[in-house]
Image (spheres, rainbow, N blue to C red):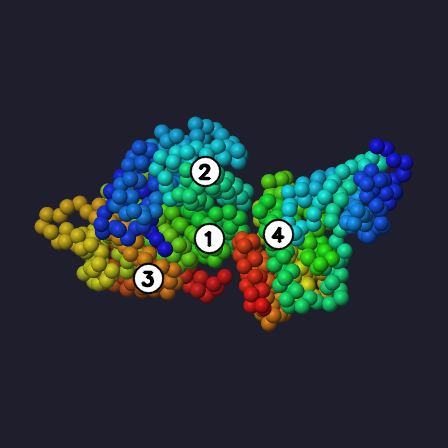
Amino acid sequence: MVVSTNTPEQLARKICTDQGLSFVGEVGAGAFKQTYLVRSHDDDLALKLIIRGNDKARIDREIAALMVCNHPNICRLLKTGKIDDEANSVVYLIEEFLPGGTLSEQIAKGFLQHANVIQLAVKLTEAIAHLAEHRITHRDIKPDNIMFRADGTPVLVDLGIARHLEASSLTKTFLLQGPGTPLFAPPEQLLNDKNLIDWRSDQFSLGVTLSYAAFGIHPFAENASLDHTVERVANRQPSTEHFRKLISERGFDALAKMVEVWPVKRFARPEMLLAAWRDNLGRDA
Amino acid sequence: MSTYHQIGHDSESMVVEAELRQFSGAILSPVNYSLNDTIAQCARFRSYKTDFDIIFDPQLYVPSVSRGKLQHWPHKPSDIDTADQSSLGWWKGTALNIIDVCKSFNPAGLCSPAFVPRTFDDAYYNLLVDIGDITAQQLKIDVALKDKTRPFLTALVGLPDLGRNERYLQVGSILSRFSGKDIYLVFVDEEKPRNERSDSGALEGAARLIRVLSQSGFRITVGFTSSEMVLWKAAGAANVATGKFFNLRRFTKGRWDEEESSGGKNISYWFEPALLAFIREADVRRYMKEFPIDPSHDTNPFSKLILENLDAPERKAWVKESWRQFLYWFSYSEALIGNDFAQSSGMVSNAVDTWHAVKDAKLRFEEERNNGDWVRAWDIVLNELDRRPG
């Protein structure tokens, strides 16, 4: 199929026509994707156009990862396809629409309450446990990549740099080109040590994310310099005393283990991490 | 918390001896016994103790010149010396053959196949874990063995390398990717026969590796150990395995050659717990003139036999009793220590003190290497573990 224009919105409208969807409007734009709200009967859906077409491996990985996932806390991929845009073929994804916004937006309004942090930890641990079961590492867990359904259910999104452990590594591109976020990355990702990257790397990133959600701080930040914080993580220096004091006061001891700089010192199995957070849940109940 | 017989050449009879009942299992050796012998061994061991824990180590790591009976086992790949051992596909086929052969004797544990590399780098450890996972996965879906046999990750770890700063954390981070619970840990070095391991930096790294993996939830079985097991137990190892020749040998790349050529196996050594040392007959006499032997000898039936023999007008060779004396000490000491750090530490401190006294008394032993330097190194290791738990 050849279309006469290459503006993303027109491509999106064309896809809607082809797929029997109603076009509603644009909801977001990133470096790689343009996202539109579309409607199928009464269901809101997200139509994502991959607007930078030179990263085929990355797109394929996201699609491959989403195809094998079937979990209530991982974004649901409903359909994927391609539309010809004169010279290029544009890939699109149709996913569930997540109207609750991102965790970043929630944190900007205020830190999460104690019980909400625990709920979030449990749900997202279940999500990374599901990925781990399929030997997939997300590698970019951060507040921007956690979104919410209308009922408040947290959902992990953007598996763009997810890596199946049997697949060849994309790690080299991680730091050089983004989109991975060094601020949330564990030392093994920052150091490109692929022998150490597995689900425990996601555990670290989730730990940092939860620290932001609960206290608004990075566990390793001594000052406002993000570079300094990343450097401390890369050098495997310990988390700050301030962080350790906060988690101890709030009863979030699991966080200290999650952000250990060596994977062997983190929770060894997803079920262990889950048990630690569920224990918190039980205590709070 | 158990001790295992590391089955070696002509050592199966010891497994079923009443005085050595404290051992709760055995690690089989296809290098030393044929498949038919192994089937018979397993039946014998099980009739001796119904819950005897039998673990199979396929021993593919032995060099070609020393494979002994392994040459004729069906699990030994015909292309073992020419295959690309970095290929997971090759290891998967090998693991399947090993699982098949296990069906004839149903071991309670199966160690994944492994090889000794030229260098103990991260890629090697990563491959070991992949091989371990493949073996565990295949075992899990095998109808005959899935409910009978638990998988072990065989981890041959370069000991000298562990002396490097934080190397144990890197190695531990890779090994802890293993999907199973049991790790069969074997430290490899180039220590000469009869020499105790005494590199305090490397030993501390090894102990810390055991500790960090145990704390991570793994059950560590340290194979091919000798009296240095006091360190491994202090660090948290669940199980330790030894054999009759471990009064002499350590796991080195060349140890199999020694075994083939008998490696001094006819020399009798008295194991003196007060020194944590293997000393020779004339040394025993000299030592006993000036120092009391360790109280644990009172309950060691083989110590009594040896002493009676030494006093007898017509003395007999006591090499067999010497093996048993060591094995008895090993199993009872392991049970005594459990994972009580203070027990291990106390044994080593006591040995340090005794060696000081021996030196003060200007007492010398026949073998020059028998100078007690290693107990000082072991004491340093335990002190560091205590000072910086990690």
Callout 2 amino acid: Asp
Callout 1 amino acid: Phe
* Label 4 element class: helix
Callout 4 amino acid: Ile
Tags 2 and 1 both on a single chain: yes
Question: Residue B15: horizontal and vertical position, in percent?
Answer: 27, 45
* Label 1 element class: loop
Residue visible at 41% across and 55% down in the picture: B237
* Label 2 element class: loop
Q: CA distance from mark 2 to mark 4?
A: 28 Å
Q: Is B242 on the left-hand or right-hand side of A166?
A: left
The residue carrying mark 3 is B347
The residue carrying mark 2 is B142
Q: Mark 2 or 3, which is nearer the eye?
A: 2
Question: Residue B387: horizontal and vertical position, in percent?
Answer: 46, 66
Q: Residues within 10 Å of mark 2 (few under 14, many from 20)?
A: some
Q: Earlier in the sequence, mark 2 or mark 3?
A: 2
The residue carrying mark 1 is B218
Q: Residue B360, labelled with which disc?
A: none
Q: Earlier in the sequence, mark 2 or mark 1?
A: 2
Residue visible at 80% across and 44% down in the picture: A49
To which chain does the residue with label 2 belong? B
Q: CA distance from mark 3 to mark 4?
A: 46 Å
